[in-house]
Image (spheres, helix red, strand yellow):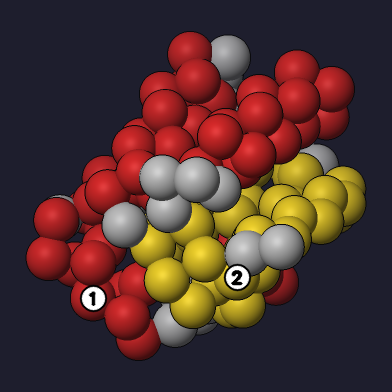
């Protein structure tokens, strides 16, 4: 499998760890996981990207959709620990100015939402 997802609750937030490659074929799995996480565990979502090695525009679309959904439910989304290639995409597209990016999950949980 090109994508693995793991979800856990932590201090009032739900953390979804994303591992592998996020592209046209795997984006629907993350989209569904995010929807379920917000519905079942609450609208404060931390996406742990430490093990995400690749992301294309389909992945960016899922992140934007997650941010919109969580915001509409009174919460928010932040990103933790993106690797250099993913961080570069976030900077290039300006998405890192819309969705907060933190160096690790613990910091994201403590400081989100700012």
Q: Secondary structure at mark 2?
A: strand
Task: Name the residue rendered at 32%, 80% in the picture.
Answer: 85
Residue for badge 2:
20
Q: Within 10 angstroms of label 1, few (less than 14), some, or many (20 or more) residues?
A: few
- Percent across and percent down for residue 105 are 66, 69
- Percent across and percent down for residue 53 are 49, 78
Depicted 60 relative to depicted 81: above or below: above
Name the one closer to the observer, 90 or 85: 85
Task: Name the residue rendered at 56%, 34% in the picture.
Answer: 28
User: Is residue 44 at least partly visible in the picture?
Assistant: no
Which part of the image, by quadrant, shows the N terminus? bottom right
Name the one closer to the observer, 102 or 22: 22
Q: Is residue 42 left or right of residue 93?
A: right
Q: Is residue 15 left or right of residue 104?
A: right
Task: Name the residue rendered at 14%, 56% in the picture.
Answer: 93
Depicted 46 relative to depicted 101: above or below: above
- Percent across and percent down for residue 48 are 62, 64
Name the one closer to the observer, 78 or 18: 18
* Nearer-N-terminus badge (2/1): 2
Task: Name the residue rendered at 56%, 18% in the picture.
Answer: 74
- Percent across and percent down for residue 38 are 70, 26
How far apart marks 2 and 1 lie (CA) works out to: 17 Å
Name the one closer to the observer, 111 or 38: 38
Q: Within 10 angstroms of label 2, few (less than 14), some, or many (20 or more) residues?
A: some
Residue for badge 1:
88
């Amino acid at each position: 499998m090109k994508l693995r997802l793991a979800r856990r609750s932590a201090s009032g937030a739900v953390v979804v760890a994303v591992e592998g490659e996020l592209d046209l074929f795997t984006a629907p799995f993350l989209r569904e996981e995010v929807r379920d996480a917000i519905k079942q565990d609450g609208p404060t979502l931390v996406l742990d990207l430490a093990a995400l090695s690749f992301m294309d525009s389909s992945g960016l679309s899922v992140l934007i959709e997650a941010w919109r959904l969580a915001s509409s439910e009174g919460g928010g989304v932040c990103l933790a620990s993106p690797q250099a290639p993913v961080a570069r995409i976030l900077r290039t597209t300006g998405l890192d100015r819309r969705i907060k990016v933190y160096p690790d999950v613990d910091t994201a949980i403590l400081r989100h939402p700012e």
